[in-house]
Image (cartoon, helix red, strand yellow):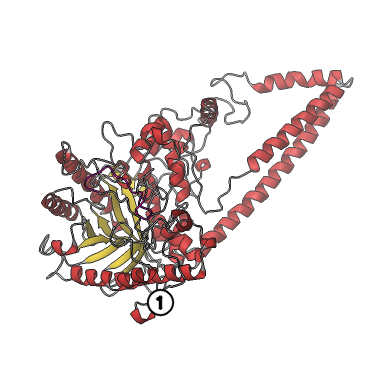
Amino acid sequence: MARIKRERAAAAAAAAAAGQVRRGKSSRERGYQVVDATYDDDEDWRGRDRRRSRRLSVNEHQGNTVKRRVVSGAAMEEGRSPMAKKAGTGTYGIRGGGVPLSPGDGTSSYDSWEKDKDEVAARQGGNGTKWWKKKKLWILTGVVLVVTILIIVVAVVVSNNKKGDDDGGGTTGTTDMSNGGLDSIPPSSIPSDAPSYLNPFKWADTTDFNLTYTDETVGDLPLMGLYSSWDDSARPNDRVPPLNKPWGPYTERPARGVNVGGWLSLEPFITPSLFTYPSRLGIIDEYTLCKYLGARCESVLEQHYSTFVTESTFREIAEAGLDHVRIPFSYWAVQTYEGDPYLFRTSWRYLLRAIEWARKYGLRINLDPHGLPGSQNGWNHSGRQGTIEWLSGPSGAINSQRSLEMHDRLSKFFSQPRYKNIITHYGLANEPKMTSIPPQAVIDWTKTANDLVRKNGITDAIIIFGDGFRGLNNWQGDLPNIPNLALDVHQYLIFNTNQIVFNHSEKVRYACQGWTDQIHLSMNPDTGYGPTLIAEWSQADTDCAKHLTNVGWGNRWTGTYITNDPSNPDVITPRCPTMDRRCDCIAANAPPEQWSDEYKRFLKMFAEAQMSSFEKSWGWFYWVWDTEDAPQWSYKKGMAAGVLPSKAYEREFDCNLADIPDFGNLPEYY
């Protein structure tokens, strides 16, 4: 009897410890989850896979029915899997070993339990039957109590979720299923040979996805995850029209937007935690990261996709007084090619869900292909740092064609009626480096891509092409007489060796005067291209952020910028305004709580100066919404620190040059 008591006490302690572990959650104090991209113990991964296999094998026997759903007006076929449940094979889906080894097999873990009960009673010296009846009564009472508590908890959670939905702005019409829970579908509804991007049981996150299986495509791109209805009645604030009403000319109502960069296309300075490896491994971009991780790339990146941007991101963007969102993504969301280590198509699903979340809050979308086959600029945010193999180099022609094929599929997909109101900007290529690629080749490709996209049904959206860093005046006369085509310009002082040396006062003045002059030049077809917008800018006043200039590289601010690239000269003399050894990146990278009031005043005025200037174009998009550790690059962190207006449309400074102070109390070396 004493042995049995000790065993029960040990079991209870173990159960309590397990419950405590299950209740523990990782901290998300920054509003997102930092992903651990380092290798875990191999045995831990194998154990996790075995547990998932056991769970799926049990769930395959559940008898849930499959709901029919309609996507874009087409009825989907259901239940095509050879794993479908066979009727009359006994009790299924019992946790803890209660599943027969095969259909019709009576062997179960319950057999040994029934045999053991009388032996236990005999050891206690009592009648087995009476003892067991009394024990069964206590067990039954306990089970009923636990079930009752669970029902109450679930009811409270559902009620709270309903409240949260009601507090949001607008609806998406996603009424086909309740919040996309995996419990709403049986595993047997997913074909055994379905790829992971069509199998929700392999997804890291199923929130707000329609989990009913379909392999239907539009433009050879999957519809899986979308619901059949949508609602375009929302708007982010009362100063702009809802999605189902015309925006009007962007010259009269410029876009005020933000990028969700570093999410579906990685950029090391935005999420440096994903690139924390010894330099000898050479992990410097998404290509080398996925090549190193191998099969683990899928779990690491999907964990990042599912946590770095969530529905709350879009709610907060709308609350900030913004009305547009630019979403960077790359070609591997659509297609990969031989030798590519990139994660194929997983980011596509998150792109589609992001558009639906933006719809819920009335935010319009700027689609931004950030990485094209072969890399259009050789920079890390194109996917692969180094050589440009797009429109130039040995593979330039084939990658040009692959990029057109990507746009053929994308434009067919996004010409569906559900995207007519929400996709207002359709990008062709982010930052093609026309200082390295022959300009005429880019111009010809842009014309071909524009014609293709229009032919496929993108009739209303503004088509966006990059300025290519060739000088705004050089676009005068190029690509003439093409309706609704706009030039995308990215404005940063800190990547220009001659502008990063401006002191604080000069930076604000240049944002008001220099960039306003450039916009007037570009917007006038007699001196520039014509329609122009600013799709990237920030408040950064140094290039000190970790990995900003590339993983492991130095910076211009302290004169440690070594490129080993003849087309990108080294900077070995400090370029902070004092241009001496005092130039300091440690102080420049200090967290917001250490910023002085005068520095905060500068950052806010610098931001508002750019907003004022850029609204003389077709609008602006801040780069980026959030970062892990670079607050001067984060709209979210800037608002929290008080260096951005609480509403983008309510500003204190509107480029009255007489109001610009000399910021004499601010050090000019950090």
Majority SS type along the magenta span: loop
Q: Toward the viewer: 254 or 564?
A: 564
Q: Is residue 387 above or below residue 156?
A: above
* Residue 42 percent across, percent down from the top left: 51, 26
Q: Give the answer, above or below, for where 533 lies relative to 113.
A: below
Is residue 561 a member of the stretch shown in magenta? yes
Q: 469 or 131: which is nearer to us? A: 469
Query: For the residue marked with disc 1, what is the amino acid?
Result: Pro
In the figure, residue 424 lies in which quadrant? Answer: bottom left
Q: Where residue 52 appears, x then y in whole percent?
A: 52, 30
Q: Residue at x 39, y 33 (%)?
A: 281
Say which quarter of the image contains residue 196. top left
Quarter of the image for the C terminus: give it: bottom left
Residue 237 appears in the rendering: yes
Q: Is residue 80 visible?
A: no
* CA neighbours of label 1 inside 10 A, class few (<14), some (14 to 19), many (20+): some
State the SS at label 1.
Answer: loop
Q: Quadrant of residue 501?
A: bottom left
Q: Which residues are magenta?
A: 555-568
**Name of the residue lying farthest toward the front:** 581
Q: Is residue 328 left or right of residue 66?
A: left
Pick the front one: 574 or 325: 574
Rendered view: 80 above or below 534: above
In the image, residue 606 lies in the stretch drawn in magenta: no
Q: Which residue is the site of mark 1?
A: 661
Give 510 or 638, whichever is nearer the viewer.
Answer: 510
- Would residue 125 appear left or right of 620 to someone viewing this image? right
- Rendered location of residue 256, percent (x, y): 35, 67
Q: Residue furthest right?
A: 125
- Quarter occupied by the N terminus: top right
